[in-house]
Image (cartoon, coloured by chain):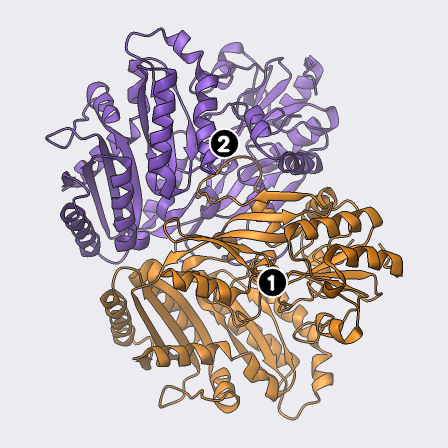
Chain colours: A orange, B purple
Amino acid sequence: MTPTALSDELLSRFAAIVGEKNALRDASDLAPHLVENRGLYHGNSPLLLRPSTTEEVAAIMKLASETGTAIVPQTGNTGLVGGQTPRNGGSDVILSLERMNKVRDIDPVANVIVVDGGCILDEVHKAAEKVERMFPLSLGSQGSCRIGGNLATNAGGTAVLAYGNMRQLCLGLEVVLPTGEIWNGLRRLKKDNTGYDLRDLFIGSEGTLGIITGAVLKLFPKPLGHQVAFAGLNSPADALKLFERASTLCGSALTGFELMPRIGVEFTAKHIPGVRDPLETPHAWYALIDISSSNSADTAQTMVETLLEQGFEAGIFQDAVIASSEAQRQALWHMRESMSDAQKPEGGSIKHDVSVPVSHVPAFMDEAERAVMSAIPDARICAFGHLGDGNIHYNISQPVGADKNAFLAQWKEINEIVHGIVLSFGGSISAEHGIGQLKRDELAAIRPAIEMDLMRRIKTAFDPAGIMNPGKVVAS
Amino acid sequence: MTPTALSDELLSRFAAIVGEKNALRDASDLAPHLVENRGLYHGNSPLLLRPSTTEEVAAIMKLASETGTAIVPQTGNTGLVGGQTPRNGGSDVILSLERMNKVRDIDPVANVIVVDGGCILDEVHKAAEKVERMFPLSLGSQGSCRIGGNLATNAGGTAVLAYGNMRQLCLGLEVVLPTGEIWNGLRRLKKDNTGYDLRDLFIGSEGTLGIITGAVLKLFPKPLGHQVAFAGLNSPADALKLFERASTLCGSALTGFELMPRIGVEFTAKHIPGVRDPLETPHAWYALIDISSSNSADTAQTMVETLLEQGFEAGIFQDAVIASSEAQRQALWHMRESMSDAQKPEGGSIKHDVSVPVSHVPAFMDEAERAVMSAIPDARICAFGHLGDGNIHYNISQPVGADKNAFLAQWKEINEIVHGIVLSFGGSISAEHGIGQLKRDELAAIRPAIEMDLMRRIKTAFDPAGIMNPGKVVAS
């Protein structure tokens, strides 16, 4: 579908659904919604609608469907692949869920919370906290990202190891379809084998099959014990050994196992206020280990002490610390979560969000390093991430003193090199950020034709007019 | 699509793909494949094909697609809703995966096993055992059910509480599509956000969207400690209280929490060789509690002892035992797993496989009992199941001395009563057995029109010719 300009008359019909106050048309109001966080995608749009109810969303989609108007759903605008950015051409209307931000219901006995699609992730954390429960999804952007987007991208983060992705944290959905019909699938059941799995089809479809306006999410008991350790290591292979011991020792009490390189620790210590290297001597690699125990504070403490004792005796690491207070635990996590931001003052960064089977992480890291250093000899590889999930944010900072734009011009070439190695290990070119616009054509190039064909058939079956976030995930 | 008879010439073309030896046409060979376990569904078929490779399955589907021939996939034929039974009319060809029964690969470091769709569940257990690992799916039919069917029905069983349904135990699939194309989605990744979730769409689709010919399944470390306890209780409400304590105390080490009524224990003690009531005095209800610890044998023992101590002190139960040997643990599980078989000598049984939110189980049990006893005053309710998942097999044995056929004639009426109560609690009319033929029309009656419409759109998109297990899940 080629974008065409929308008439004023049509824009006014859309505006009438939500009221003029909630129909933004001024360039300055629209500006923050036309670009995503990394600045990789800029689009434009004549209109942003802010509905306040599921019925208003349905009315918008009904009109869009009748008039062939493209709709781009947006929640916190924190996505990293251009999935929430309108296309150029000025024909995409943005539908923001920011006013649909309520907690609808919370039941600490049944351990569920029901929220609007525009509910901010941190608000879900707070609501759970108030009833002595915990919602485990944990992301750097949790102060601004919203549940609808978290579900649409099947968000991951730092607690996936124990609790799973957003897919595993969701029991039911309410979705407005491209036609304007409402699917009420707000179920609260652990087991339900009644027909095709529509819920998991909408989760991860990045707003291309419908708009997630409500969700039933799982809550968990608050852990009674929480320990964080930080260990200096020689290599990713040693980190894997430590992960395997931690996994055996702690089972599902192992809630996070993050890998960081020396250069990442240096960047954060240099650029992020309050961060310092917690160990006295430098190490090539670091592991951040998070243990949460549901039965007692002692259990988590015994586990972390036993793990470090075992790891030290087996010669897996040379030095390690256990955070002795909540402030220290937060400081260690703050270092990890600032790793991407700390790269910014160092110039351009070519990024990858990849996964390989966990046992292949060390071999992948070796091969990728050789290939990248051979392409860009002074590149500064800052590869960090969720080792326990096999998910590495394989970021590459520009050589010191290099021209930023010239470096970034190699993005595609370097992506091809790294992704080629990822695929040779049976890995994924998008472990948690999704496809959006950024990886749409690459996905089509690497996947079997039948797989892309099945996706297109689903897209056509759900969105025959091609109006639902067009140009994302699969080509229109 | 109205079934029409198939020509001998066409049957011979199908037979040529697998060889005459693997193309069964004799009535006596076909007979066991035309009826399911409970005898609720009888169908017929002129031909059963036993391919030995994915390519042969693909060739069969290609021919079926070209000639509009209906294909019914069958694995262990242990399904309970007629999903694997051919229709009447003699136009359905059965495709059995029984010869595709190999373990393709096993990797204990990465904790994955890759198997054919026809691999028997117990063979997966044994293969895992050999490398000191565990595959948690546990079902009464595990000696004969096969992985393709377990995935097609998203099988549940007694370890769902800790490990999830089949959906949660599967990383990747190989599927032959109705068109004969092969989708290779045999990925081994924990995190992979690359497009629509085809895997979860095929899982639970009961062979109506394609044939699952291979799968990557998750393995787990073998638990170091295993304890089973059995407690006598006054009511499902007390069982729920005990479950909540067990859940808090044990976290993911709580691997099973089953509820049984007095009458079920009596039936098993009477009809199942070797089963006896483990407690000295009778109780109205019983809980079977299974605790597996990954870090040490002591942990499981401490947990079970603490739980019983707490439960006794809080007055939740009156009497309980802890199994003191592997033989005793198996005996307790044998009682639970024989509960359905033990009903058979007692005459007809009207069955339900329902779920409600866990916290509503006691209220559901009260209401359902009142309604059923009012409809059939001497009915013997034998409601048991996976309390921790909110999943109750709400079975009703006929009154003593009643006419079996007259009793079973009330199946539909009683289903409507019980399912009405289930739905009033936001529950599911099929928690784990699926839809098949048995609940197809009922599903369409209780679900919103848009939900059934979306399912039909998916069905049409994947199977435009309507040849893939027609008449199951959604009407053709």
| Quarter that holds the N terminus of chain B | top right
The quadrant in which residue B251 appears is bottom left
Q: Is residue B384 above or below residue B347?
A: below
**Chain to which the residue tagged by mark 2 belongs:** B
* Residue B317: % across, % down: 17, 40
Can the viewer see residue B101 in this picture?
A: no
Lateral position of residue B310 relative to residue B363, left or right: left
- Total marks drawn? 2
Nearer the observer: mark 1 or 2; the answer is 2
Q: Amino acid at mark 1?
A: Ser
Name the one closer to the observer, A383 or B359. Answer: B359
Mark drawn on residue B434 = 2
Both labels 1 and 2 in a single chain: no
Tell me the kind of residue under disc 2: Gly
Chain of the residue displaying label 1: A
Secondary structure beneath label 2: loop
Disc 1 marks which residue?
A430
- Specify the quadrant that holds the C terminus of chain B: top right
Frontmost residue, A125 versus B91: A125
Q: Please, is residue B406 above or below residue B326 in the view? A: above
